[in-house]
Amino acid sequence: MALAAQVESALSLLLAEAAGRDLAGRLGAPTTQAWLRDRFRLTPHEAAASVRKAQTLHGDGGRAGQRADHLAGALSEGTVLPSQAQAIVDVLESAPASASTSTRRAAEDRLVEDAAVVDAKGLRRLGHRIWEVVDPDSADASEAARLEAAERRAHDRRRLGFLPLGDGMTLVTGRLPDADAAPWCAPRSTRWPLPCPIRQPVPIRGPVANVRRTRWWSSPAGPWPAGTCPTTAASNRGW
């Protein structure tokens, strides 16, 4: 693992040098990231992460004050693993605007020191905690934005599926945001009852009546109005 860290360090140094000499532009590429993608068949995410790491470790445009010298040295010595180095780079990039250069360096030193006993995930948590102490207002705003984004993702991923089993029962499966599922997680005495059955609009008849159906009907699920529930698949489309 130490050898892998040293190789990663050398590659980052070469990439920073290539970016400083505008190698990508000389080769006809619009950016260093685009050159990496084309030359080494990297994904956009991988190429962007490599460029950001090189800039953080070895500076961008000659701005020595922005270099993570301690982290670069630890990576070259193999005392920090590549995944840990990427975690520390991500933390340093997320520093609040109010963080001074000395504060960034102190955070870097602390994270490099803790890399001896903490994995990459733990370093990210520790780094976020450092920025919460440095700039509580910015941390609160970031947390609010994170929660809002999580709520939007949960809203977009809502789904309910209904599978008639052919024995008078319907199997229901789906995914709901916590707030919408809360009434169903309440104690039985206070659980939200279903006031109406869920019916299949087209009954199953003939020789296939006893065969379990494998076709699902599903749609984005929304909050159910109090005292109501969908009665047919057609009515579900309005959710």
Image (tube, rainbow, N blue to C red):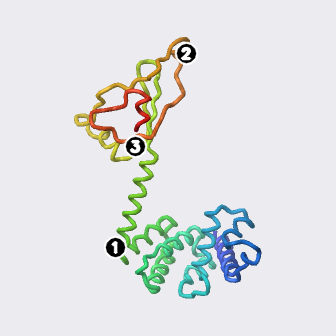
Tag 2's secondary structure? helix
Quadrant location of the N terminus in the rendered image: bottom right
Q: CA distance from mark 1 to mark 3?
A: 31 Å
Q: Position of residue 200 (x, y in %)?
A: 44, 23
Closer to the camera in the image, 171 or 26: 26
Tag 1's secondary structure? helix
Q: Which residue is mark 1?
A: 137
Q: Vertically, is 225 above or below 109?
A: above
- Does label 3 or label 2 sit earlier along the sequence? 3
- Does label 1 or label 2 sit earlier along the sequence? 1
* Residue at point 38%, 59% (across, down): 147
Q: Vertically, is 221 above or below 59?
A: above
Amino acid type assigned to the residue bearing label 1 in the image: Asp
* Residue at point 39%, 71% (across, down): 129
Amino acid type assigned to the residue bearing label 3 in the image: Leu
Q: Which residue is mark 3?
A: 176
Q: Quadrant of residue 190?
A: top left
* Residue at point 38%, 46% (across, down): 177
Relative side of 219 to 74, left or right: left
Q: Quadrant of residue 22?
A: bottom right
Q: Which residue is mark 2?
A: 208
Q: Position of residue 168 (x, y in %)?
A: 41, 19
Tag 3's secondary structure? loop
Circle 2: is it few (<14), some (14-19), or many (20+) Cα within 10 Å?
few
Q: Vertically, is 148 above or below 78?
A: above
Residue lying farthest to the right in this orientation: 27
Residue lying farthest to the top in this orientation: 206
